Amino acid sequence: MGPTACAVLLITLEVALLTAGEEALKAKSFAFASYYGDHMVLQQAPRKAAIWGYAAKPGETITLSISGKGEVNTTSFNGPMATTPVWSVQLPAIAAGGPYNITATSSEGSIGLTDVLFGDVWICSGQSNMQFTLSMALNATEEMADVPNYPNIRVFTVALGGSPVEEYDLLNISQHWSVPSAGTIGGPNWSYFSGVCWLYGKYLSSHLKNPIGLIASSYGGTRVEAWSAPNVLKKCGVSDVSGVNPNSASVLWNAMMRPFLNMTIYGAIWYQGEANAGSSTMNQYNCTFPAMIDDWRERFHQGSEGQTDPAFPFGFVQLAPYRNNDTITTGFTDIRWHQTADYGYVPNDRMKNTFMAVAMDLPDFTSPYTGVHPRDKQDVSMRLCTAGLAVAYNQTQFSTFDGPIPGLFIIYTKERTMEINFYKDLDIRSTTGFEVTCTNSSAPSSDESEWFPLPIVSHDNTSVTLDYSQICLQTKNMVVSAVRYAWRESPCPFKKCGVYNKDSGYPAPPFVESVITNKSNVKIVK
């Protein structure tokens, strides 16, 4: 089911879930919160895993015992709803491994969790390309056959649904914590399990050799505003939208993300932005997306009583191509740029401890799920994983894997050429993709909206050279004013954009750069 269908068909379901969820919350007695269950992964040391649940009345003493690790005590108290007492504990910091059994005991009896592992917990969120299931991806048969080889990865999927108010617990669950199998990973299309989430976790687990818990909470066709708390939208000047539907302000934050705040997590990955491309809030994405990340970090840190890192690692996929049309220069291009807070790369001063997978060179125009849903989730996930190992795990051997980033622009005014230095060994796969715009040196305020393609005329190991002599005519006092790269919705054939990292094979991300102002990264040679 595609994102539009999801948006239309599930509005009625959401309203029903709100009512059912509220009634279920009121009826809780002694129980764990909904997203704790057998086979789950809890966050490993040095962080302490937080566990919470429900009690029949406040003042109850609850004792939690962990096999071989002792016990901890807590007392129930009135939660966010006066009729629903809750309890919360932090377990001792437990190193990666397991399985463990956890038992909670009160005057009401005992409840337990079995086959619990300790490792790293990652949340996977966004819209349809994150919801896109492994069964729909390329080489799905081979991937499914490989699934049982990763018993230390555990998966959980949140049911689709929204709420007009912040929820303390999940309204519904599509897939409870599960051990990987053909059935638990190969569910119906658009249900479970997320292809990008699974492959990211698989590649991560293969390297780290530790248990990985994956929580998939995504909803096709949705904008960033739906996943953002009201204070984020206010900060960015985004007006509220009334009603309960997948794209109303904050409704998915309320129902599909807010409930996890009391859980200790390691990090999050995100694949979203297509729904914001061309929308009325597109040009605010450079504010809303970074602000959403900031807000999630702060709230997860507070909700876990300081156990989730206040700057937990956050990775995302920069938008892939869509239509087989190399003339479209707005929409996806704007979102790709705004995904980096207009820096062109991450981490940066605005988006610290973030990492990115560039996907603009992975078109799939013949995808049966339309070109906006490319089936190659392996390349995307591997790029995201290596970036995550570098940033989230400080694995320095992966720090040079990212795509080349332009560092210095040298303008040779006599030769009328521009040299762009990337400071990495380059693999030039195409001479196309660069464009410049010109301005009149005697009237710099003149229109600079027209862009001209400019092929690479030469290159060495770390730089490319462009010749703009036939574009910005000297006889008309024209000078090059800006340069941009890969500024197209679908900039190139599969893995055939212009500039790649020679060692890793990863592409340079798109960029736009002014080259006429006094900037430290622009050098004029006369």
Image: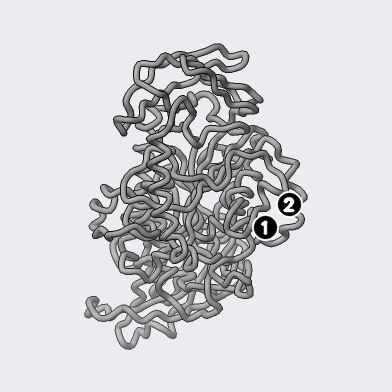
Q: Are marks 1 and 2 in contact (CB under 8 Å)?
A: yes
Residue 293 against residue 85 in the figure, above or below: below
> Residue 93 at x, y = what percent?
52, 20
Q: Quick one: SS at disc 2? A: helix
- The kind of residue on which mark 2 rests is Met
Q: Which residue is mark 2?
A: 144
Which of the 4 image quarters holds residue 15?
A: bottom left
Residue 79 against residue 409 in the figure, above or below: above
Residue visible at 62% across and 48% down? 198
Residue visible at 39% across and 40% down? 23
Residue 209 against residue 171 in the figure, above or below: above
Q: Which residue is mark 1?
A: 135
Residue 411 or residue 501, whichever sits in front: 501
Label 2, residues with CA under 10 Å away: few <14, some 14-19, many ≥20: some
Q: Residue furthest bottom?
A: 475
Residue visible at 59% across and 44% down? 398
- The kind of residue on which mark 1 rests is Ser
Residue visible at 37% across and 32% down? 303
> Residue 141 at x, y = what percent?
75, 57
> Residue 276 at x, y = what percent?
39, 64
